[in-house]
């Protein structure tokens, strides 16, 4: 999966539009001060479209907890969605996402930069100008060289293995290959030549080929400036140097992170964030059920992971009108689905894949993933609703006949020359109970039309690296159906579709196009999308790609994932940022 979520939540792909109709929002970010986008009245799902408890009140300790830990607090070395959300407290990348609820929050806007990238040289050169008066936490001025250094760090996968590697893929290559700044010092390569800093407030990126979504790449925390003299390599996570509203006071690895206000931060230079609490504390490795109980009791303010409460708390919330009124159930931007392999026989026949699409019982799939509230909405498209350009359609009657259409499934079996059905394997992650149940449910549904399936469970940690992501293994073990999930690194169609549907992403190991789709229509649309700078035109390709993938029956959509979030009544400026699929942490305050 791409942008990893702690429930499971990638190396090119996922994006958003530069120009969306702005929703209500104050100039200080967070939407406070706007009657059109704000509401002081709580209620179930109130924070999905409105700001709940808007306020600029300062003070108090904002307390987070997580049942696990972050992959890293180093903005150049993290890939968890909630970690990217948390970095907004202490980083300013070149671009970021607008702080406002609803579709407005899918806009990518300048942060450290003064504006979006200026594109020249037929799409090969992107130039950004940065604000001249942004300071690090020690009062030194941020320069373009600090941003370049942050980008250079991402090239050393030995030191920083966890974050995405977009820059090494997109930037113009050099010989010898750039090894990152730590090895560069010894080899005297003299820096990354594809990134230039002609003056302290200008940074220029030279791409290998045009890539229209580059503004979304530089919105990833990896462009947050890093002063070279403060970089401690793998240990930088213990104290990333802040440009945001808060700085690190202490970090007990895997136990607790404490942030305090950065006195050199100015709201005028970082309007998408706020500096309201007097302190922020994040507790790691807290028992999940204990975390939920403390959250409901008011002893904690936010579940940092943002993936929703556990089953016991979910039952309490949904059975209590008071608790439910302080909860939200947003679509997270994550899709649960099954790859329908286009090479494994007889699934290489599109009509056999269509038979699977029609025979699947979507209601049972939804139940397996937790039902309409905890699991999500029945999916009929590959792109979830918060991918820009997504349009609803229902090619295989997923929503109109959620129990399946067995007559049409049998008709497709006739068309693929398998009137009595066929045999294939279903792969899934055996240590994920919901996915196990979903695989078993699909097996039962397909058996009704004579499709006999054998179940093959694998551990999550090696599912993609050793099994589902290795085409030779998939072919040799007759795995025609493989369970999976996906979320984009940025919310447009290219970012969502490229790595799971583009023919040139099929690889012998680490494969992300697990259905092995190599459709010229899809490939051509993705190429057009990558080279189209106009946002409206670019986003128009999303639904076209989605439709073509579904016509090929290459993916069986199951559920647009939802997460039941508890919204503490102690919080102010609370709303779901659709890009993250959780609350926007950067603007939270306390009553």
Image (tube, rainbow, N blue to C red):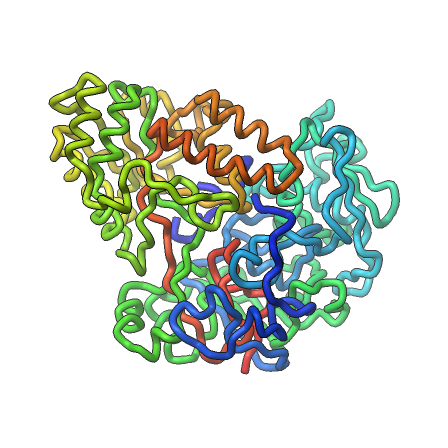
Residue at figure coordinates x 60%, y 66% from the top left: 24
Residue at figure coordinates x 53%, y 63% from the top left: 101
Residue at figure coordinates x 73%, y 23% from the top left: 175
* Quarter occupied by residue 401: top left
Horizontal and vertical percent position of residue 146? 77, 49
Horizontal and vertical percent position of residue 500? 45, 33
Picture layout, residue 46 above or below residue 524: below
| Number of numbered markers | 0
Foreground residue, 261 or 589? 589
Residue at figure coordinates x 22%, y 49% from the top left: 363
**Residue 400 in view (yes/no):** yes
Which quadrant: the N terminus? top left
Which quadrant: the C terminus? bottom right
The answer to whether 64 appears left or right of 189 in the picture is left
* Quarter occupied by residue 135: bottom right
- In this view, which residue lies farthest toward the right? 199
The answer to whether 576 appears left or right of 422 in the picture is right
Horizontal and vertical percent position of residue 79? 53, 48
Picture layout, residue 470 above or below residue 238: above
Picture layout, residue 591 above or below residue 553: below
**Residue 10 in view (yes/no):** no
Foreground residue, 251 or 583? 583
Horizontal and vertical percent position of residue 451? 16, 29
Picture layout, residue 156 above or below residue 246: above
The answer to whether 489 appears left or right of 217 in the picture is left
* Quarter occupied by residue 171: top right
């Amino acid at each position: 999966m791409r942008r990893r979520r702690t429930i499971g939540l990638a190396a090119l792909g996922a994006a958003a539009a530069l120009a969306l109709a702005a929703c209500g929002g104050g100039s200080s970010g967070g939407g406070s001060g706007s009657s059109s986008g704000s509401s002081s009245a709580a209620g179930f799902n109130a924070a999905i479209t409105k700001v709940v408890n808007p306020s600029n009140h300062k003070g108090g300790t904002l307390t987070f907890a997580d049942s696990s830990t972050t992959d890293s607090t180093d903005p150049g070395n993290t890939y968890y969605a909630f970690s990217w959300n948390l970095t907004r407290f202490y980083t300013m990348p070149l671009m970021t996402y607008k702080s406002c609820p609803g579709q407005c929050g899918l806009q990518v806007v300048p942060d450290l930069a003064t504006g979006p990238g200026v594109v020249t040289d037929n799409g090969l050169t992107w130039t950004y100008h940065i604000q001249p008066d942004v300071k690090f936490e020690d009062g030194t001025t941020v320069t373009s060289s600090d941003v370049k250094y942050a980008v250079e760090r991402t090239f050393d996968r030995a030191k920083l293995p966890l974050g995405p590697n977009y820059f090494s893929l997109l930037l113009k290559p050099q010989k010898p290959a750039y090894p990152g700044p730590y090895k560069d010092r010894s080899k005297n390569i003299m820096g990354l030549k594809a990134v230039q800093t002609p003056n302290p407030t200008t940074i220029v990126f030279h791409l290998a080929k045009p890539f229209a979504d580059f503004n979304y790449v530089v919105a990833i925390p990896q462009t947050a400036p890093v002063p070279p003299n403060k970089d401690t390599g793998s240990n930088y996570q213990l104290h990333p140097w802040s440009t945001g509203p808060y700085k690190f006071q202490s970090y007990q690895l895997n136990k607790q992170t404490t942030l305090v206000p950065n006195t050199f931060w100015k709201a005028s230079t970082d309007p998408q964030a706020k500096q309201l609490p007097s302190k922020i504390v994040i507790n790691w490795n807290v028992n999940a059920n204990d975390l939920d109980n403390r959250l409901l009791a008011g002893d904690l303010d936010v579940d940092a992971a943002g993936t929703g409460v556990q089953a016991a708390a979910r039952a309490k919330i949904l059975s209590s009108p008071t608790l439910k009124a302080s909860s939200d159930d947003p679509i997270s931007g994550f899709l649960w689905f099954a790859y329908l392999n286009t090479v494994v026989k007889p699934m290489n026949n599109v009509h056999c894949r269509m038979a699977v699409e029609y025979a699947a019982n979507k209601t049972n799939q939804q139940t397996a993933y937790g039902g309409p509230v905890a699991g999500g909405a029945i999916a009929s498209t590959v792109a979830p609703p918060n991918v820009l350009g997504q349009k609803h359609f229902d090619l295989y009657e997923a929503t109109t006949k959620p129990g399946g259409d067995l007559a049409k499934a049998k008709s497709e079996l006739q068309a693929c020359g398998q009137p009595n059905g066929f045999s294939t394997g279903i792969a899934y992650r055996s240590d994920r109970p919901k996915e196990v149940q979903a695989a078993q449910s699909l097996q039962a549904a397909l058996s009704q039309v004579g499709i006999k399936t054998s179940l093959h469970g694998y551990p999550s940690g090696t599912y993609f690296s050793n099994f589902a992501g290795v085409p030779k293994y998939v072919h040799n073990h007759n795995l025609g159906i493989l369970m999976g999930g996906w979320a984009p690194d940025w919310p447009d169609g290219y970012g969502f579709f490229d790595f799971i549907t583009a023919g040139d992403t099929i690889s012998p190991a680490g494969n992300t196009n697990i259905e092995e789709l190599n459709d010229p229509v899809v490939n051509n649309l993705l190429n057009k999308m990558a080279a189209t700078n106009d946002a409206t035109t670019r986003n128009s390709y999303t639904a076209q790609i989605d439709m073509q993938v579904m016509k090929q029956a290459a993916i069986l959509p199951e559920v647009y994932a939802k997460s039941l979030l508890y919204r503490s009544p102690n919080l102010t400026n609370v709303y779901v940022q659709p890009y993250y699929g959780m609350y926007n942490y950067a603007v939270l305050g306390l009553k």
